[in-house]
Amino acid sequence: MTELTTTLTGYAAQARDDAHVRDEAAAADITQENTFDVKGLNLFYDKTQALKNINMTIKKHEITALIGPSGCGKSTFIKTLNRMNDWIENCRVTGEILFEGRNIYKEVDSLALRYRVGMVFQQPTPFPKSVFENIAYGPRIQGISNKKKLAEIVEESMHQAAVWDELKDRLHESALGLSGGQQQRLCIARTLAARPSVILMDEPTSALDPISTQKIEDLALQLKEKYTIVIVTHSMQQARRISDRTAFFLLGELLEFNNTVDMFTKPANPKTEAYITGRFG
Ligand SMILES: Nc1ncnc2c1ncn2[C@@H]1O[C@H](COP(=O)(O)OP(=O)(O)OP(=O)(O)O)[C@@H](O)[C@H]1O
């Protein structure tokens, strides 16, 4: 099974046991200015420490880019934001992550959190189902069965993911027949259909051609009006083009975190400068 299939199967199983979490998700405090406040976060895989004392604020309706060389902890960090690391054996977290003011390990149910904090992966991961059923999957496991309502959610999500015009006549075709770029926007539509307030994107364009990449970047810029976006990227150009703030990770530490313009024009740390100018990594 792919990581995403495992994730959604996990959602479905929990959803059956745990219907009350929808109410909890809806009750989240949307008046908070910061989406995430990360305080003294450490993460260990067995005895290996992958994240070291991370302190970071992720602001609402901004795009925050996570950059750094391979193995520095970007994916590990982004997955802590919706507790996807819970499924990794021997993974231990200390410190605090507040989501909209509430501690995600103490005050928020993990399923409720994942409804609010959706994730898009590096490789598009459509299910072997129709375009429509891919997007309706999340709402269905959240308990929505009314056909008209499902059709509305599918259409709205596809509009938001800028894929409606291209795919409205292919709703009942297999999603596996779509191009990689269409599949990735379909996966974004599927994420949006679960009504999140945050979209986590882990290298969402690394498997795509330049035109599809540009479509996803344009889409991210549109989506930040309604959502908070966190994106892992190996592309300095992409971080510069679309993000409001950039976080530079090195060997599990957050070495520098600043607004993107300042980070790229006057980095404070010589190691940041060396990385963003391509001198290592
Ligand atoms: N499930 C795991 N078990 C043990 N160690 C892990 C696990 N996942 C990641 N690591 C280790 O944690 C460190 C950070 O990995 P992570 O995947 O977060 O880095 P990254 O910055 O996203 O890298 P890349 O850019 O190559 O994707 C690495 O040393 C990695 O080997």
Image (cartoon, rainbow, N blue to C red):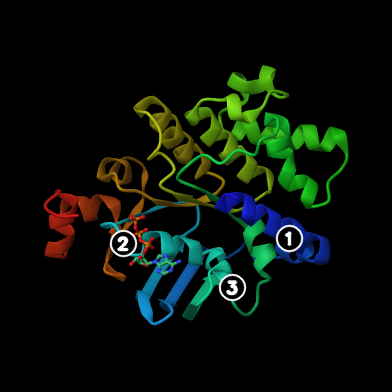
Q: Please name the residue that numbered disc 3 is placed on.
A: 104
Depicted 215 relative to depicted 225: above or below = above
| Residue depicted at 85% across the width and 33% down the height | 148
The image quarter containing residue 132 is top right
Callout 1 amino acid: Ala
| Marks 2 and 1 close (CB-CB < 8 Å) | no
- Residue at the outermost front position: 1
The answer for how far apart the CA atoms under marks 3 and 2 are is 25 Å
Depicted 105 relative to depicted 240: above or below = below
Looking at the rendered structure, the secondary structure element under dot 1 is: helix
Please tell me which residue lies in front, 132 or 39: 132
Q: Quadrant of the C terminus?
A: bottom left
The answer for how far apart the CA atoms under marks 2 and 1 are is 36 Å
Depicted 191 relative to depicted 150: above or below = below
Which comes sooner in the sequence, label 2 or label 1? 1
Callout 3 amino acid: Ile
Tell which tag, 3 or 2, sits nearer the viewer.
2
Numbered circle sitting on residue 269? none
Tell which tag, 1 or 3, sits nearer the viewer.
3
Q: Is residue 36 visible?
A: yes
Which comes sooner in the sequence, label 3 or label 2? 2
Q: Please name the residue that numbered disc 2 is placed on.
A: 71
* Label 2 near ligand 1 (CB < 8 Å): yes
Please tell me which residue lies in front, 112 or 156: 112
Please tell me which residue lies in front, 139 or 218: 139
Looking at the rendered structure, the secondary structure element under dot 2 is: loop
| Marks 1 and 3 close (CB-CB < 8 Å) | no
Tell which tag, 2 or 1, sits nearer the viewer.
2
How packed mark 2 is, by other alpha carbons closer than 10 Å (few <14, some 14-19, many 20 or more), is: few
Which comes sooner in the sequence, label 1 or label 3? 1
Residue 48 placement (x, y as % from top left): 36, 78
